[in-house]
Image (cartoon, coloured by chain):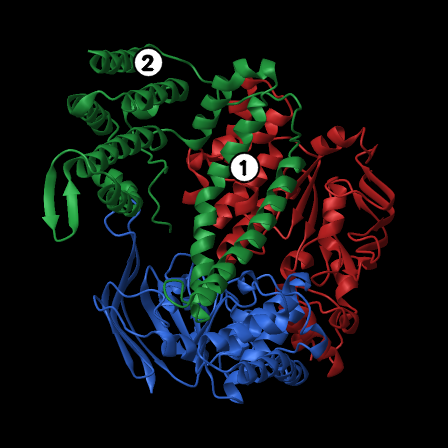
Amino acid sequence: MKSVEVKNLFFSYNGNDMTVSDVSFSVEKGSYTTIIGHNGSGKSTVAKLLAGLLEKRSGTINICGYELNNENLTEIRRRIGIVFQNPDNQFIGSTVRDDIAFGLENHCVEREKMDEIIETYARKVGMSRYLDKEPGNLSGGQKQRVAIAGVLAMAPEVLIFDEATSMLDPQRKDEIKKVIRSLHDESGLTILSITHDIDEVAGSDNVLVMDHGKLVLTGTPAEIFSDQDRLNRMRLDIPFSAQLIRSLNKKGVRLRPFMGMEELAEELCRLRSQK
Amino acid sequence: MGNLTLGRYIPMDSPIHKMDPRAKILAMLMMLIAIFIPSGWIGYGILFVIVSMVIILAKLSFSFIFKAMKPMLFMLVFLLIINILVVKTGYVLLQMGSIVIWSDAVFNTLYIAVRLLLMIMITTCLTATTKPLDMTMGIEDLLKPFQKIHVPAHEIAMLISIALRFIPDLIDETMRIMKAQESRGVDLKEGKMMERITAILSLIVPLFVSAFQRAEDLANAMEARGYAPGQPRTRYKQLKMESRDYVLLICAGLILAGMIGMAVL
Amino acid sequence: MSITFSKVSYVYSPGTPYEYRALDGVDLTLEEGKITAIIGRTGSGKSTLIQHLNALLLPNEGEIQILGRTIKAGEKPKNLKPLRKDVGLVFQFPEYQLFEETVIKDVIFGPKNFGVSEEDAKKKAKEALALVGLSEDIYEKSPLELSGGQKRRVAIADILAMDPKILVLDEPTAGLDPMGTKEMMSLFYRLNRQFGKTILIVTHDMEQVYQYCDDVVVLEDGKVRIHQDKDTFFRDAKECESMGILPPALIRMKEILKAKGFTLSENIHSVDALAEALREEVRNG
């Protein structure tokens, strides 16, 4: 089953330069997909197109079996949730509780059901104790948790994270990444994450690489990281373990093209004991 | 880290904080009208005592009120000077060479100062004890009867609530930009006319750019979560008038009536 | 010469319900001519600390000595312009400070405020723009129509054109892509090594600290917890982790390998050096 199917997508802000040019891809239901690319490569624009926040030039977008168009927009917005980069600019309510309720109000959920839904999702992101706090008293990481809860409360099937951790400090970043992970592993949500975080990319099922508005590379992390020169040319980062493997390969120590640090260390141990 | 106190919500656990925003807004309006009734010094004295009691009940500190008053001081001094120059009635209080200060000039200014102080005290009683969202819900409900004549009550309320939500952020942003420009040698306090205009531009242009960015982000976030203006939606927060709210309204009504009575007699 | 903080404390909104002690008795001596990283959790006082360097914030307690000047608590310093010129402060997301009609005008703005003539200011501006890697064809463009990365460069050129002796940067690479980050950090490295600028960088990125900085200052709850050279600092990965700091990947990899019985020298600081050492061990057992 495909959760997202995009075919021949084109988009332009000014009518001339194509910000998104002939992009086609699909996302398997329940998978964790990352989109990488340098700033200005068009990856955030793709996210906004999927959520129906921008109008495509041409091409088709299919979300959970619904084609994205004006008639289906409400149905699609129930199925796709998006968490943005800036924690301050997506907090709409005056307290955590009100902010999670915002989406429910828009979808005309009955008042009687709201409290339970709010509490359930606040617990899921670890914000139960902060329900009556205001945004000014929350850290960036906590605001992002609230944003996630607000989106989850609408029970979407697909969650998009548009550089949702890029403005957080390392500890908060890790915490939010764990929350996203658990949504995928435990709740079975389809995750589409736009990120510069190379560790997050390494842990995902599939990677889409964008460059100058085009989708230039797709594959598993191992496949993507095996072509380091190409990634470098596209101004992208490579995980440390992949850099080390490459350097070792050049020095005549033959290894698989991609492993995590732990795995690589074990592999080296094995090689050492063979001699 | 804005130091602005006027209009800021102060979270406290007090009976005033718990009251229905609609009752508080209506009571405030009645009290404001009461201020503008010329009920004389005794009337103002009574109002002052009553409002002070409300402030104590709301667990607000008086220093907070005076801080809110501070920005008005400049205006009052200006007013005093104008009054001294213009008003030539009452009796002569002081004569220094060609400058004559008449009693009415001073009393007029004092009168305005007292009204201003009362106004700030009363509005602070509302804004400091009412969460911005409650306030907008109150306004929305109070405007509902006017929907029949096509007043977009809900949109107005949403507009106000978003404005209130972002005021602290914009103040922080202003401080930040000010500091950034000061680091580039901008002197916001001194300098020639042209330099001051540039200094102000260096503040306003970035502020607009960032406000538009915010607005765009916010619109995206709202739309993505299913918001569309004019479309029906349910409401999470419900307002309920309780007996204490009716008591508040009756009290405010009585005070207003009393002030009118004093003015007439 | 050095920059000295003696028992410096700073309190936001004193006497209000929002009172907050951001710096609490900071004692710190920073040597000029180095690249020093200032790290610590959000709210540890990093941004407050750096705003004392050009007297945007004045200490509530204690005193600061910088470039031959003393800023004391309770004393209003006179004529701050020379200090503001010599200590260039680049805020987080500095692209928000751009406001002029053209890029070149925006960069000239700073030096002109400090009394440099139009002609000299233009010369300085061009040098600064060249340093940050922007070419002449954007001089007459509006700064608002540039890409995010270009805006950041212009904002940094704004400060460089003032020709500061000390350059202070608050998370200068936040929001940049990996390559943009690398280019930016190399620029600061060059400004230090080639032009002798003292550089202070507030950052969360340990890879940057490891690759480009000389010293590390760790702030915790408004106090200086650690001030060391970076090699000493990263030697103890456990200690780093106890402070919530994730050591650089190279250090983490070495730790994992050491735990598995590999013997690796302290002097391995690059991927290739590590690969070489590993090859030796794997070959010779």
Quadrant into which the N terminus of chain C falls: bottom left
Q: In this view, does C114 lie to the left or right of B115?
A: right
Q: Residue C40, located in which quarter of the rendered image?
A: bottom left
What amino acid is labelled 1 in the image?
Ile
Residue at the image position 70 percent from the left and 72 percent from the top: C138
Residue C260 can be seen in this image: no
Image location of residue C158, percent across then percent down: 54, 73
Residue A230 x %, y %: 79, 71
Task: Identify the hue of chain B.
Answer: green
Tell me which corner region of the image, top left, top right, bottom left or bottom right, holds residue B39.
top left
Is the C-beta separation of discs 1 and 2 under 8 Å?
no
Q: How crowded is mark 1: few (under 14 residues within 10 Å), some or many (20 or more)?
A: many
Q: Is residue B190 visible?
A: yes
Tell me the mark number nearer the camera, choosing from 1 and 2. Answer: 2
Between residue C173 and residue A272, name the one nearer to us.
C173
Residue A266 horizontal/vertical position (percent): 64, 67
The amino acid on which the numbered mark 2 sits, given as a three-letter code, is Leu
Marking on residue C164: none
Q: Circle 2 sits in a helix, a strand or a loop, which is it?
A: helix
**What crowding class fits label 2: few (fewer than 14 Cα within 10 Å), some (14-19), or many (20 or more)?**
many
Disc 1/disc 2 C-alpha distance (Å): 31 Å
Chain C, hue in figure: blue
Say which element carries label 1.
Answer: loop
Chain ID for red: A
Q: Mark 2 points at which residue?
A: B249
Residue carrying label 1:
A92
Instruction: Identify whether A169 is placed above or below C195.
Output: above
What chain does mark 1 sit on? A
Specify the subunit that label 2 lies on: B
Identified at 50% across, 33% down, the residue is B161
Q: Where is residue B199 in the image (x, y as percent from the top left)?
A: 47, 63
